[in-house]
Amino acid sequence: MSDSDGLDDETLEKYREAGSVLRQVLDEAAEKVEPGVTHLEVAEFAEERIRELADGCAFPANISVDEEASHATPGRDDDTEFGEELVCLDCGVHVDGYIADAAVTVDLSGNAELVEAAEEALDAALEAVGPGVQTGEVGAAIEDVIRGYGYTPVLNLSGHGVAQYDAHTGPTIPNRGTERGVELEVGDVVAIEPFATTGRGKVSEGSNAEIYSLENDRSVRNRSARQVLDQVKDEYKTLPFAARWLEGSRAEMALRRLEQQGILHSYPVLKEDDGELVSQAEHTVVVTEDGCEILTE
């Protein structure tokens, strides 16, 4: 064990490598977000770079626009172009299953203060992190900054732990102050992600889902469904994947069948009210004796 980090050195190095790759790819991908470029071009660029530089994507590139907050990724033939919008780009990298998760907001809409609110809230949260600190205290630091800007934190989205092949585990890091919470410990690896919104601070599920993950592995009789399930287990394990990553002309029907059978879980797009805006900032950190080490800086 490494005394200062509470993780064995080999595991910590894998997290660091994932974080370093993610920082590079996120910076490169954000540069490509501009009017006239398609969401699919940016998503595929980010995902290809991640596969070149690391073991794979921890989840599909999320490209959320304006009122969208999370789980938005383009479909196979999506030709949607960026306009004068607020664009959140959220990507994940894994090295041997160890995950880094980070996000930036690219402002094409003239809402720099909303972007700044999420970034400043993330900085305040990172300063608050340390062993023995309650997760609710970290949430309070986030909420204070965002409300100080005159915006609302998204109350029903939160930061989270990351573990090997698990992109969302405990502890939960709320985006508001709470009395209940858990104490952070040395060696915890957490993704902290403040969302700031012009809206009421609650997101709800839209009708569209392009992201899935394996929930229950059981036998399937249908041949095309079985082929999809085999690909998922082999290539993505329990990590979320995009429908467009699947091979075969019948993949879409197979996905629906597997979801109906409770084998796959879908992630509908999470949205604020129409006409509102959401910004996001995110880093993955490991809690250390004297605070935290930012893995995605």
Image (cartoon, rainbow, N blue to C red):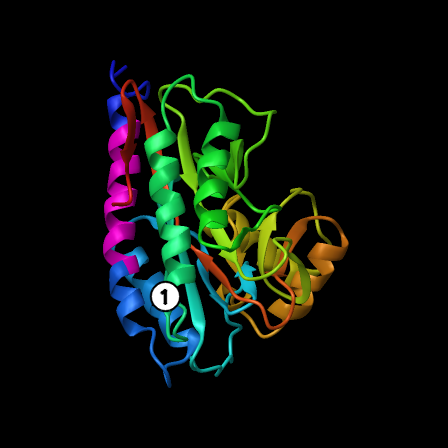
Q: Nearer the viewer, residue 92 or 248?
A: 92
User: The magenta stretch spans which residues?
Assistant: 11-26
Whether residue 21 is in magenta: the answer is yes
Of the 4 image quadrants, the one containing the C terminus is: top left
According to the image, label 1 marks what residue?
Answer: 112
Overall secondary structure of the magenta stretch?
A: helix
Whether residue 241 is in magenta: the answer is no
- Residue density around tag 1, few if under 14, some if 14–19, many if 20 or more, within 10 Å: some
Give SS at disc 1.
helix
**What residue is drawn where x is 45% and y is 75%?**
85
**What residue is drawn where x is 43% and y is 41%?**
192
Say left or right for 129 vs 151: left
Q: Which amino acid type is marked by label 1?
A: Ala
Above or below, comparing residue 90 to residue 99 in the picture: below
Q: Nearer the viewer, residue 107 or 120?
A: 120
Q: Nearer the viewer, residue 159 or 223?
A: 159
Say left or right for 15 vs 76: left
Tally the numbered discs: 1
Of the 4 image quadrants, the one containing the N terminus is: top left
Residue 140 seen from this side: yes
Residue 96 seen from this side: no
Say left or right for 145 vs 266: left
**What residue is drawn where x is 52% and y is 42%?**
175
Q: Nearer the viewer, residue 143 or 203?
A: 143
Above or below, comparing residue 61 to residue 140 in the picture: below
Place of residue 133 in the rendered image (x, y in percent of width and height, measured from the top left): 43, 21
Q: Quadrant of residue 260?
A: bottom right
Place of residue 31 in the rendered image (x, y in percent of width and height, measured from the top left): 26, 70
**What residue is drawn where x is 28% and y is 29%?**
12
Place of residue 75 in the rendered image (x, y in percent of width and height, measured from the top left): 53, 73
